[in-house]
Amino acid sequence: MKTEKQLYTEIKNLVKVNFLNNGRYKYLAYTLKNIIQDDEAINIISSGKFEGKQLEILVTNKRILMVNSGIVPERHEISIEKIEALQLETKGITTRLCINIAGNKFIIENLANYQNFMNIVNEQMNNYKSFKIEVNKTVEKDIMDKIERLAGLQKEGILTEYEFATKKMELLEQLKK
């Protein structure tokens, strides 16, 4: 876990910390010290209403965190990998960000700096998808290499046709996952 000092430095690099809001961001760093992991970077800090409560809303490389660092701490999180779509809805002067996950909508109202927020969430979603594609390509290549080695063993008479076909089917099943 990151230390409070590390988190406060990250926060200061993202927002203007001044005399009036210094305490707020120090307390946010204190709240986050047991939440943010070492391999997690905060990309943007905003504020908005979620489920009727005013919260600090952060986007990291892994998730959207909504925290209230008040007397009764509250925390909600949405994993970047599970987000299917983002939608911006405007009703009168109110702007709402809808985050779609498995048919459910999570709505953040009055989100400050919503355009930058959406851009960063979209960027993180794309990073996750490209990482997943790279991992899938690596797994696919590994499986194809294994099948080629098995075919060589069958050709040499070390494996029977049945053994080769069985193991090949097992490996091809892994590609479907």
Image (cartoon, rainbow, N blue to C red):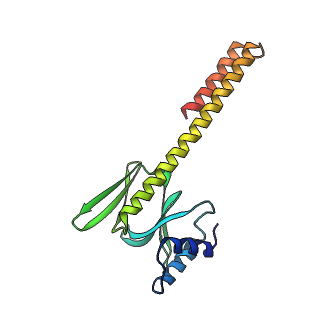
Number of marks present in the image shown: 0
Task: Name the side, left or right, on which 96 lies relative to 17.
Answer: left
Instruction: Tell me what residue is drawn at x 50 percent, y 58 percent.
Output: 63
Q: Position of residue 92 (x, y in %)?
A: 21, 66
Q: Is residue 72 above or below residue 108?
A: below
Q: Is residue 133 above or below residue 96?
A: above
Instruction: Tell me what residue is drawn at x 46 percent, y 77 percent.
Output: 16
Q: Is residue 166 above or below residue 83?
A: above
Identify the image quadrant of the N terminus. Answer: bottom right
Q: Nearer the viewer, residue 10 or 71?
A: 10
Q: Position of residue 144 (x, y in %)?
A: 63, 27
Within the image, what quadrant is residue 155 found in? top right
Outermost residue, bottom direction?
19
Instruction: Tell me what residue is drawn at x 51 percent, y 44 percent.
Output: 130
Q: Nearer the viewer, residue 67 or 143?
A: 143
Identify the image quadrant of the C terminus. Answer: top right
Q: Position of residue 38 (x, y in %)?
A: 63, 63
Task: Name the side, left or right, on which 100 lies relative to 143.
Answer: left
